[in-house]
Image (tube, grey):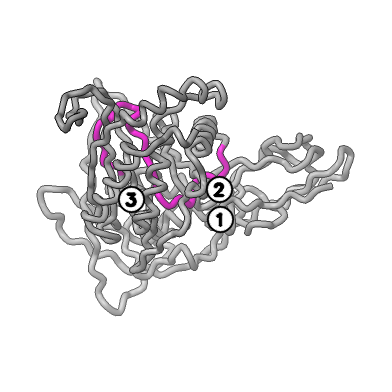
């Protein structure tokens, strides 16, 4: 008999919500077969059974939030006595007094709606109802009143989809802005100034239009990107890189490399290695913002953004990249990208990066301003590499025109962390490493 516990699903994750059991009590389960699904503040993931046997007890029903390490079920041998699954406890009713909303006339011409006033609303952190970590994070990020959100989960609990639907209603101007009749509003001792935000214009679909609902991953991505733009003063710096030096090495090693490794040697590992080395000289690029502090990391956990069939992005992380040579970095990038596209990554592998590279050039982009992956301070876009005429030096001190592979490296950076000269100097250093290093020594 083996107890099934909630595993550690990330370095900063302390709890998770059981969102689905794939097996019922009495069902046979194989080792490593998906047993339940858990939602954390970072990711939703399926967790496999640690052993083969029969699920003889479910201790934590769907919808319950438990800390890491808690026993949530028991798998035993065939024929073992099974226990009835526990019933999900209903969420306790919390009576809360809300401040009244005062709304004035909307300014022309943009339509506006009154945002929910949360001066007397319960914060997600001290609400004693069972809210999953991801729900609490969304409620906090959007300053929502949980009493105004209808729950559709087990026992009336609020799910992530409920919060996202509520956010959509706010944007459309249809979210409730006053407490229900069953919860009378308390009189505020001082008038509360309403917060007014411009709403997106409402577009009506016609006969020649198709309606494609935004997926949840698109909505979550949008919310995170909006947050990033709101907290970081974004700036953009760009350099042009001549990849002829890289091509010389690739031409000599690409056949042997593919035969040995099973995948092609692209430009991305070279760029990644150059970035990691340049961060040594520009440590403030490899940092995170925390309040009024810049936390400079003494290691490089390199995030590589991966497109998931056009549905969204995942950013798996090459851990401790500062201690790895080009071949090792190339192996990890290939492995992480392959498993990202087949949904085989663990939560630990897609969080905690210190610097991110977005490989937009693989899709043909020639200049991209990416949005910073919070709480990092910079993100580098590797844009398309194309053959074009360049001026080159020739023996004897003259110049000539040659056709070389050339591409941009465009970096979005947080102006709170440093200024343009620092960002530009870092990019120039990356460019110098790419164009002048003897890369054959890596092989």
The mark found on residue 378 in the picture is 3
Q: Nearer the viewer, mark 1 or mark 3?
A: 3
In the figure, 184 relative to 215: above or below?
below
What residue span does the magenta drawing correspond to? 345-370
SS for tag 2? helix
Answer whether labels 2 and 1 touch (C-beta < 8 Å).
Answer: yes
Residue to which mark 2 is pinned: 348
Q: Which residue lies furthest to the left in this view?
A: 108
Q: In which quarter of the image is residue 99?
A: bottom left
CA distance for labels 2 and 3: 21 Å
Q: In which quarter of the image is residue 421?
A: bottom left
SS for tag 3? strand
248 or 24: nearer the eye? 248
Mark closest to the chain's N terminus, 2 or 3: 2
State the residue at coordinates (43%, 40%).
304
Residue 259: x %, y % from top left: 55, 21
Mark closest to the chain's N terminus, 1 or 3: 1
The mark found on residue 11 in the picture is 1
Q: How crowded is mark 1: few (under 14 residues within 10 Å), some or many (20 or more)?
A: few
CA distance for labels 1 and 3: 22 Å
Residue 262: x %, y % from top left: 55, 24
């Amino acid at each position: 008999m083996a107890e099934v516990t909630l595993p550690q699903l990330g370095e900063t994750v302390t709890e998770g919500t059981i969102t689905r059991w794939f097996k019922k009590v009495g069902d046979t389960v194989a080792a490593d077969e998906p047993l339940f699904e858990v939602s954390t503040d970072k990711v939703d993931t399926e967790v496999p059974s640690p052993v083969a046997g029969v699920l003889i007890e479910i201790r934590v029903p769907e919808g319950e939030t438990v800390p890491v390490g808690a026993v949530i079920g028991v798998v035993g041998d065939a024929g073992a006595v099974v226990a009835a699954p526990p019933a999900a406890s209903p969420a306790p009713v919390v009576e809360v007094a809300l401040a009244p909303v005062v709304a004035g006339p909307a300014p022309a011409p943009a339509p506006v709606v009154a945002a929910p006033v949360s001066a007397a609303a319960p914060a997600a952190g001290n609400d004693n109802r069972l809210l999953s970590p991801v729900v609490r994070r969304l409620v906090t990020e959007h300053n929502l009143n949980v009493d105004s959100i209808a729950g559709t989960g087990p026992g009336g609990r609020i799910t992530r989809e409920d919060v996202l639907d509520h956010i959509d209603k706010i944007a459309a101007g249809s979210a409730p802005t006053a407490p229900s009749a069953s919860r009378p509003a308390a009189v505020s001792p001082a008038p509360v100034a309403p917060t007014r935000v411009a709403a997106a214009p409402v577009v009506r679909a016609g006969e020649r239009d198709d309606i494609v609902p935004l997926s949840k991953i698109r909505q979550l991505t949008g919310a995170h990107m909006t947050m990033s733009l709101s907290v970081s003063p974004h700036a953009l710096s760009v350099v042009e890189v001549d990849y002829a030096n890289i091509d010389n090495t690739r031409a000599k090693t690409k056949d042997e490399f593919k035969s040995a490794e099973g995948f092609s040697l692209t430009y991305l590992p070279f760029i990644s290695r150059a970035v990691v080395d340049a961060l040594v000289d520009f440590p403030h690029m490899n940092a995170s913002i925390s309040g009024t502090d810049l936390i400079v990391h003494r290691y490089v956990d390199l995030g590589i953004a991966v497109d998931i069939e056009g549905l969204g992005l995942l950013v798996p992380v090459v851990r401790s990249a500062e201690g790895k040579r080009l071949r090792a970095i190339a192996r990890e990038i290939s492995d992480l990208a392959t498993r990202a596209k087949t949904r085989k990554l663990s939560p630990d592998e897609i969080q905690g990066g210190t610097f991110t590279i977005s490989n937009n050039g693989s899709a043909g982009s020639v200049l991209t301003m990416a949005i910073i992956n919070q709480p990092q301070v910079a993100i580098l876009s590797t844009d398309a590499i194309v053959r074009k005429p360049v001026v080159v030096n020739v023996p004897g001190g003259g110049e000539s025109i040659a056709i070389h592979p050339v591409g941009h490296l465009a970096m979005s950076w947080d102006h709170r962390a440093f200024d343009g000269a620092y960002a530009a100097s870092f990019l120039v250093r990356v460019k110098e490493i790419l164009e002048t290093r003897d890369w054959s020594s890596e092989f």
